[in-house]
């Protein structure tokens, strides 16, 4: 292999390692708490902004620039309508943050991060294209290793308490105590995305792909963590990912799924029940009374969305500024940094002009990613991860929190930059 190609492959592989292992573990070490916020306040600001992930995005952008990335060359390959959507978005999504927001400094900080996301997506595309793709089996290994390391971090954090908290386990906010995550639900969303990716690898394995010994044990671990987190959105996201995989690759290997994957999932659900930390209710998939009303089943999301949309209609064109639900939309006396729905989030933060452009960009990129997966079966796990994240974004902040936006951008970049396989290699 030529040295230049090896160097490019190393950069793309390091990007995969950073996304799957290094950054999640770094966040777990940096942001630890037993309450809703970390201290000191500046550390909480860094956590809300996803600063370690933003700095990593900037680092890979600089790496891509050193390796010859030309932004205009990449844009020239886009369809004209997609370029117009980008220009409309970039020209409008910041207006309310600068001129309408009640907290312009906060809104503009979140706004600038979106520019970093866009540039990072281009950098990831360049690095992956230069490397000729990313090995899905290696990336699955890094994702699994990241969650295995998280098990140790969580166990130490939950079992070895500071002296002033010993004996007070029953009053600790365990739902906010998963290291590196603002809530156990977001940890569950991460595990759901990894589970969808591993399900894609199982799909490949059982239809003629590699047969690594670590795959099913890794899936068992990830399934257990997903169930332990009590995140129903993760189950929904995995279901959507399976449907998306079916659309891309045809019927799944039903026998393997029924005989191996589904029993693992069922066992994980049963084992997760006694593992709920100190009986905290947030770690159960379902509690008595959840199905009594829409608000109960959705944890109040429908009420929150309606309130957010009432604020949006007062500023329909350009919205009320990034992260404005944090101070404009209360739910039961509390404010949330994002409204747990990507479309509502976009409308509230950016208004209808930028929202239409953003959805066009996202839909176009996702369509091309699926088309690429139909031409290269190795992309099936990546497109299933993407589908899972986008489905979960309808009920949580996958398009707000930086770690998830970075993962979505990486998944799209891999799908769009990986070359198709020869026709003879496309049989599923």
Image (cartoon, grey):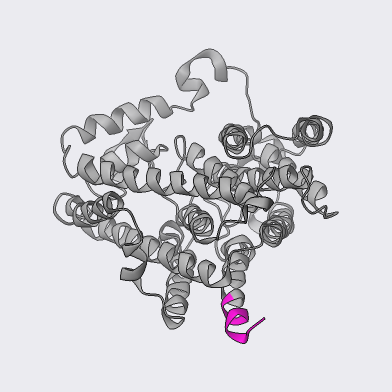
User: Residue drawn 17% across and 37% down?
Assistant: 316
> Going by the picture, which residue comes out furthest to the bottom?
3
Residue nearer the viewer, 111 or 408: 408
Residue nearer the viewer, 222 or 48: 222
Q: Is residue 151 magenta?
A: no
User: Residue drawn 61% across and 76% down?
Assistant: 10
Question: What is the quadrant of the C terminus in the image?
Answer: top right
Q: Whole-percent x and y of residue 280?
A: 65, 36
Q: Is residue 6 magenta?
A: yes
| Magenta-drawn segment | 1-8
Question: What is the quadrant of the N terminus in the image?
Answer: bottom right
> Most prominent secondary structure in the magenta stretch?
helix
Residue nearer the viewer, 254 or 91: 254
Residue 76 lies left or right of residue 351; in this view the side is: right
Q: Whole-percent x and y of residue 132?
A: 58, 68
Residue nearer the viewer, 130 or 174: 130
- State which quadrant residue 307 falls in: top left
- Against 411, residue 188 (above or below) is above
| Residue 222 visible at all | no
- Against 160, residue 357 (above or below) is above
| Residue 50 visible at all | yes
């Amino acid at each position: 292999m030529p040295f230049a190609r090896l160097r490019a492959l190393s950069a793309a592989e390091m990007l995969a390692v950073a996304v799957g292992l290094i950054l999640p573990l770094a966040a777990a070490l940096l942001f630890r708490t037993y309450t809703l916020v970390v201290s000191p306040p500046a550390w909480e600001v860094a956590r809300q902004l996803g600063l370690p992930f933003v700095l990593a995005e900037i680092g890979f952008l600089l790496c891509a620039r050193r390796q010859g990335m030309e932004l205009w060359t990449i844009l020239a390959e886009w369809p004209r309508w997609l370029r117009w959507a980008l220009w409309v978005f970039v020209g409008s999504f910041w207006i309310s943050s600068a001129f309408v927001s009640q907290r312009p400094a906060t809104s503009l900080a979140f706004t600038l991060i979106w520019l970093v996301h866009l540039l990072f997506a281009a950098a990831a595309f360049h690095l992956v294209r230069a490397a000729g793709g990313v090995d899905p089996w290696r990336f699955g290994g890094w994702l699994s290793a990241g969650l295995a390391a998280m098990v140790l971090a969580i166990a130490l954090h939950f079992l070895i308490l500071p002296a002033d908290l010993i004996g007070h386990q029953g009053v600790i906010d365990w739902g906010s105590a998963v290291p590196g995550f603002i809530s156990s639900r977001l940890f569950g969303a991460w595990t759901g995305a990894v589970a969808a990716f591993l399900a894609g690898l199982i799909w490949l394995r059982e239809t003629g792909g590699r047969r690594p010994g670590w795959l099913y044990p890794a899936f068992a671990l990830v399934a257990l963590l997903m169930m332990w987190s009590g995140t129903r959105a993760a189950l929904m996201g995995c279901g959507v990912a399976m449907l998306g995989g079916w659309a891309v690759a045809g019927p799944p290997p039903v026998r393997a799924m029924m005989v191996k994957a589904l029993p693992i999932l069922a066992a994980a659900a049963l084992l997760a029940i006694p593992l709920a930390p100190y009986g905290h209710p947030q770690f159960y998939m379902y509690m008595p009374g959840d199905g009594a009303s829409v608000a109960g089943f959705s944890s109040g999301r429908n009420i929150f969305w309606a309130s957010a949309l009432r604020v949006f209609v007062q500023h329909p064109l350009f919205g009320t500024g990034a992260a404005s639900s944090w101070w404009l939309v209360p739910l039961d006396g509390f404010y949330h940094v994002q409204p747990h729905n990507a479309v509502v989030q976009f409308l509230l933060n950016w208004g209808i002009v930028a929202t239409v452009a953003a959805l066009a960009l996202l839909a176009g990129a996702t369509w091309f990613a699926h088309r690429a997966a139909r031409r290269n079966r190795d992309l099936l796990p990546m497109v299933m991860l993407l589908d899972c994240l986008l489905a979960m974004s309808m009920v949580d902040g996958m398009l707000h929190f930086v770690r998830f936006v970075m993962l979505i951008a990486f998944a799209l970049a891999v799908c769009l930059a990986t070359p198709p396989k020869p026709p003879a290699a496309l049989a599923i």
